[in-house]
Image (cartoon, rainbow, N blue to C red):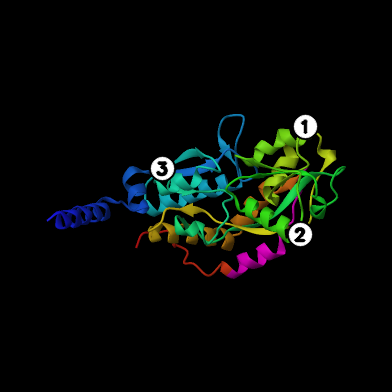
Amino acid sequence: MLVYRLFFIIFLFIYSTSIFAEDIMSKIEKNGMIKIGFRDHLYPFSYIDSQNKFRGFAVDFANLLVEKLSDHFGKPIKLIPVQITTQNRFNKIVNNDIDIEMGSTTYSFDREKIVDFSIIYFFSETTIIHNKHSIKNTNDLNGKIVAVTMNTTNYHFLIKFLKNHDVKLKKLILLNEHFDSLPLLEERKIDAFCSDRTILLGIIKKIKNKDDFIISNTPIGYEPYAFMLPENNSDFRDFVNNFLIWTIKTNIYFDIYKKWFKINDTIIPISPYLREYLSVISFDLPDNWWEKN
């Protein structure tokens, strides 16, 4: 009797969950808003400006996505920005605290076991920023103090690199956020910081003694970025994917890129690999792709 009762309780839980779980597109239409997660120190992808507003490469995409969602539903959709961190971003998606995370999260097979992803929209490399007076390149890390952000693909790439090249660090420091490395570099408490090249470009732009530092040209891993979504929301994922393809087809993608990827007003050339990838995925879309069926 107890076994039957237990099965009945499990059945009720599964049945009620399937009934009351609301898909994201329906929730956006019903509530007239979408909650988008951004990290606050992730220049040029997302950061908080002097007026306490989110700005950046990914934020511009978010604003455009909301415009297209408004067109789709035929009513204004409000963007609710939610500040997240490198450490809590996955839980924010899994717990439905946000509807989508837009930034520089790297797609991986293991991560897709708990969350879903849009198509890849950007490539970066894992490498290091280092004091050029103490380190020549990534092969010169023996006996050095290196920092990396915990729970990132950068950490795994770095550990693999150290093992494969038989490099013995003096100390490996684990950080909570990428920009926690800034004062450590400035005060010479670390010799190098390992992260995505695009994030390192943001760090070197803010660092005080810029002339003492250099970003290595040697990659130790590659980072395919995608927007992170809750699982089992294929309609929303399709809309986001079509939106990204539309930005590529209309060259809006490249206009946003030129706005954010520059050093001293000089645009950083887009990677030929990224450009080729974008051309491959930009299949034809109907002019009214965002309209409701």
Query: Mark 1: which secondary structure?
Result: loop
Badge nearest the viewer, 1 or 2: 2
Check the picture and name the quadrant holding the C terminus: bottom left
| Membership of 268 in magenta stretch | yes
CA distance for labels 2 and 3? 41 Å
Residue nearer the viewer, 214 or 10: 10
Residue on which disc 2 sits: 165
Query: Mark 3: which secondary structure?
Result: loop
Q: What residue occupies the far top of the structure in this picture?
A: 51
CA distance for labels 1 and 2? 28 Å
Residue 97: image tag: 3
Residue at 76%, 59% (x, y): give it.
165
Q: Earlier in the sequence, mark 2 or mark 3?
A: 3
Q: Residues within 10 Å of mark 2 (few under 14, many from 20)?
A: few
Q: Earlier in the sequence, mark 3 or mark 1?
A: 3
Residue at 48%, 39% (x, y): give it.
81
Residue nearer the viewer, 1 or 120: 1
